[in-house]
């Protein structure tokens, strides 16, 4: 909560304004009670005629209207403040997620991340716009009323001094229970969101295996757990408001009885007694409001805990803070680059065994290195290290002799084109998706890249050609079409370093064959690392590095490696029997 309050610094003027308006309204409330008591006293006890109390009635009317306007103003400022903080927090969260990179934001936590960035931040609204200002007010207004009552009646002031700390003590006690209930509720909601995303993404698999019902039940269990957690928080909230109400009413009753007794025995004038009776419930009102705002805003606080956890997470890879100067280095694309891994070791977690062990490897310009090895050998991890998504635990990666950690990492990434097994198509037109590689590419350049990648012909056959909308809510593409777009995109990028992570592994041979020309052009004359399974790809490489268990166990040309009775030969026999014959 402290961090959240710190977050409010940017809007402290607005926060001060809401508190100021609220406090003014509180002081006007004392005046309002004062005038009401005066009017009642004059009319009922002194039998004053209407014309005598008329000016007071006008004042009372004015006070009521002013308080109405102030209350509206208060809500407007508070809402404005909440929107600013939420927007700022969401932008910081997104910027930090980019810093954390794709390995951190991997599959396993996507549902939870969507939940936090969207629902979590929305839930902060109540906390920011209602609870925080109320926190200041529930100290200031009761204090003002107390000060006023003290000047009029010491006994009531004493009762209030005893009652208020008791109420606050109970509020804190219940607040603690509410916090843990709310945290459980939030975890269940995140689980629900994660399961739903999982269900959507895995729908085909579930249908194929006839497991839809199982998973729907699995989702149902998460839903039921969420319902139970919600009921628990509600129970705590109801208990809290019941206790607050009870204490406030009991205290008001005690004050009323003491006032009544003294009124009957003429030890207190009616005016004072009535005024204090009007003010006593108002003394407790801000505390009761704080109690209910606390429960309403608690989900936001719990979500905020998770948001700050993400904001404080350390990026596993290299980060460049001035990533906004994007187009500054576009001129050195023609340079060539030598990549060297020098004793590189990497573990995903200090507590886990390394998945990359002491790797030494050099790839020169114009050279294509194929990485092969069984599943889990560490090939993709090696590519992630080279892109700076991960940082070596020991050793270093040198680019033209300069350590990658000394590079402004975005500048390096601009020199690297990557083709993966699966390419993400963003919501936008075909043209937008292609130009992503080079926003200032001319239309001819885009079309030429699409032709080389064998994508042009089917793009023009789409309903709106290059202007067809793709991605979320847009036109669907086949796997082969998507990969051809990816090749066109990489060609447009025209980067001196190319990394391929089996981009054609899941495509049929014919589609793969049509992509060969584009890929060959993509690789020509550059520094290339290909993660490869297929013999055809491996054979084109100048050199093959065989990885197993995070180590490079063999290195050489296809012929060299086939000549020794090693892992490569074994792998080839296992994978590529069909291809070789
Ligand atoms: N985010 C992660 N956290 C912890 N361990 C991971 C993570 N990602 C991968 N690993 C582990 O690191 C090892 C190497 O994985 P990697 O994906 O690099 O292998 P690979 O050779 O590319 O495999 P494949 O050919 O199946 O894609 C595996 O044992 C994997 O379980």
Image (spheres, rainbow, N blue to C red):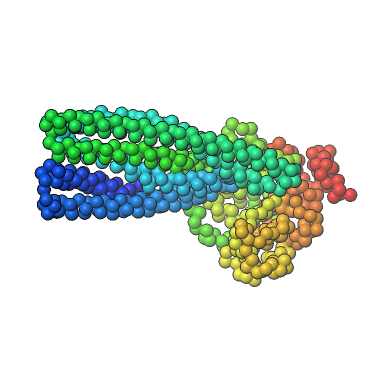
As drawn, 252 above or below 382:
above
Residue placed at 38% from the left, 41% from the top? 293
Quadrant occupied by the N terminus = top left
Residue placed at 55% from the left, 43% from the top? 112
Q: Position of residue 358 (x, y in %)?
A: 65, 37
With 195 as the anchor, is 120 left or right in this view?
left
Q: Position of residue 160 (x, y in %)?
A: 24, 32
Q: Is residue 235 visible?
A: yes
Residue 476 or 575: which is nearer the viewer?
476
Residue 139 or 46: which is nearer the viewer?
46
Residue 83 or 249: which is nearer the viewer?
249
Answer with the quadrant where ligand 1 appears in the image.
Answer: top right
**Number of numbered callouts drawn:** 0
- Residue closest to the far bottom: 444
Residue 280 or 523: which is nearer the viewer?
280
Residue placed at 40% from the left, 43% from the top? 127
As drawn, 522 above or below 5:
below
With 338 as the anchor, is 560 left or right in this view?
right
Q: Position of residue 166 (x, y in %)?
A: 31, 28
As drawn, 146 above or below 426:
above
With 82 as the anchor, is 375 left or right in this view?
right
Q: Is residue 305 visible?
A: no
Residue placed at 68% from the left, 65% from the top? 449
Residue 466, by quadrant, is: bottom right
């Amino acid at each position: 909560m402290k961090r959240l309050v710190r977050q409010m610094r940017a809007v402290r003027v607005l926060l001060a304004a809401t508190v100021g308006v609220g406090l003014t309204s509180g002081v006007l409330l004392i005046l309002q009670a004062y005038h009401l008591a005066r009017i009642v006293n004059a009319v009922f006890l002194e039998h004053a005629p209407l014309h005598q109390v008329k000016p007071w009635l006008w004042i009372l009317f004015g006070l009521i209207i002013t308080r109405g306007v102030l209350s509206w103003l208060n809500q407007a400022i508070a809402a404005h403040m909440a929107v600013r903080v939420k927007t700022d927090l969401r932008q910081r969260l997104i910027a930090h997620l980019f810093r954390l990179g794709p390995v951190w934001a991997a599959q396993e936590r996507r549902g939870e991340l969507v939940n936090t960035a969207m629902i979590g931040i929305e839930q902060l609204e109540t906390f920011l716009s209602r609870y925080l200002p109320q926190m200041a007010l529930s100290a200031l207004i009761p204090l003002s009323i107390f000060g006023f009552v003290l000047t009029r009646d010491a006994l009531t002031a004493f009762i209030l001094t005893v009652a208020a700390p008791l109420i606050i003590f109970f509020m804190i006690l219940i607040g603690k229970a509410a916090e843990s209930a709310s945290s459980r509720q939030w975890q269940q909601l995140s689980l629900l969101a994660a399961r739903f995303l999982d269900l959507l993404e895995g729908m085909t698999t579930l249908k194929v295996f006839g497991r839809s019902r199982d998973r729907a039940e699995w989702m149902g269990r998460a839903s039921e757990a969420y319902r139970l957690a919600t009921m628990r928080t509600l129970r705590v909230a109801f208990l809290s408001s019941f206790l607050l109400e009870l204490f406030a009413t009991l205290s008001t009753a005690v004050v009323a009885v003491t006032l009544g007794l003294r009124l009957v025995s003429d030890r207190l004038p009616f005016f004072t007694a009535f005024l204090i009776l009007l003010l006593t419930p108002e003394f407790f009102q801000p505390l009761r409001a704080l109690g209910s705002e606390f429960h309403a805003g608690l989900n936001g606080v719990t979500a905020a805990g998770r948001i700050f956890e993400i904001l404080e997470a350390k990026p596993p890879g290299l980060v460049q803070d001035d990533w906004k100067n994007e187009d500054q280095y576009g001129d050195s694309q023609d340079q060539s680059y030598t990549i060297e891994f020098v004793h590189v070791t990497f573990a995903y977690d200090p507590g886990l065994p390394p998945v990359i062990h002491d790797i030494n490897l050099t790839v020169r310009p114009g050279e294509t290195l194929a990485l092969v090895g069984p599943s889990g050998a560490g090939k993709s991890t090696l590519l992630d290290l080279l892109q700076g998504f991960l940082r070596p635990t020991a050793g270093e990666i040198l680019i033209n002799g300069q350590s990658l950690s000394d590079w402004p990492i975005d500048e390096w990434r601009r020199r690297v084109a990557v083709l993966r097994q699966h390419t993400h198509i963003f919501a936008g037109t075909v043209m937008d998706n292609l130009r992503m590689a080079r926003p200032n590419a001319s239309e001819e350049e885009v079309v030429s890249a699409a032709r080389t990648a064998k994508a042009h012909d089917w793009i023009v056959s789409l309903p709106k050609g290059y202007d067809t909308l793709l991605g979320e809510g847009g036109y669907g593409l086949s796997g082969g079409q998507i990969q051809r777009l990816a090749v066109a995109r990489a060609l447009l990028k025209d980067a001196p370093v190319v990394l391929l992570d089996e981009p054609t592994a899941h495509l049929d041979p014919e589609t793969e064959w049509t992509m060969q020309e584009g890929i060959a052009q993509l690789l020509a004359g550059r520094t290339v690392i290909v993660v490869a399974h297929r013999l055809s790809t491996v054979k084109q490489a100048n050199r093959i590095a065989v990885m197993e268990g995070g180590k490079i166990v063999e290195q050489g040309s296809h012929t060299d490696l086939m000549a020794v009775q090693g892992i490569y030969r074994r792998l080839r026999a296992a994978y590529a029997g069909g291809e070789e014959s």
